[in-house]
Image (cartoon, helix red, strand yellow):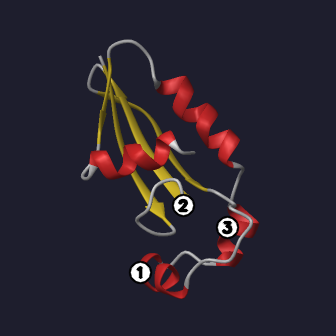
Amino acid sequence: MRLVYFDTETTGVKPGKDKIIEIALLIYEDGKLLEEYDQFININEKLPAKIIELTGITDEILESEGVSADDVAEKIHDNLIEKSVWIAHNTQFDLLFIYNL
């Protein structure tokens, strides 16, 4: 069985309007850590000041270290395999954003 622990940072709380700016995955299979994935997403727009304050993520970080949302969507797709369980602190919130990635 594959377990995927995940978390997101977003530009706000409204899926479909706000966007994911960081996603982290810890991927385990049969109790062994397979991969740690932590990626910023370049959304090509300015972050709200409150989000910068809350997350410590800046426009500069997203511009220099961020990848496209398509790259992240591909990573997620590759790990949505049979017998995988996705686990998060606030799963419903994170999944709503992933669905809109």
Tag 2 near tag 1, CB within 8 Å: no
Q: Quadrant of residue 45?
A: bottom right
Mark 1–mark 3 Cα distance, whole angstroms, equals: 15 Å
Q: Residue 87, position in %: x, y?
A: 28, 39
Q: Earlier in the sequence, mark 2 or mark 1?
A: 2
Quadrant holding the N terminus: top left
Q: Residues within 10 Å of mark 3 (few under 14, many from 20)?
A: many
Q: Residue at x 49, y 40 (%)?
A: 99
Question: To which residue does mark 2 refer?
Answer: 17
Disc 2 marks a residue whose amino acid type is Lys
* Near-viewer residue (1 or 7): 7
Q: Residue 16, position in %: x, y?
A: 52, 53
Q: Residue at x 53, y 63 (%)?
A: 18
Quadrant holding the C terminus: top right
Select label 2 or label 3 by which is in front: 2
State whether residue 80 is above or below residue 51. Answer: above
Q: Residue 75, position in %: x, y?
A: 58, 34
For residue 50, side relative to residue 78 (left or right): left
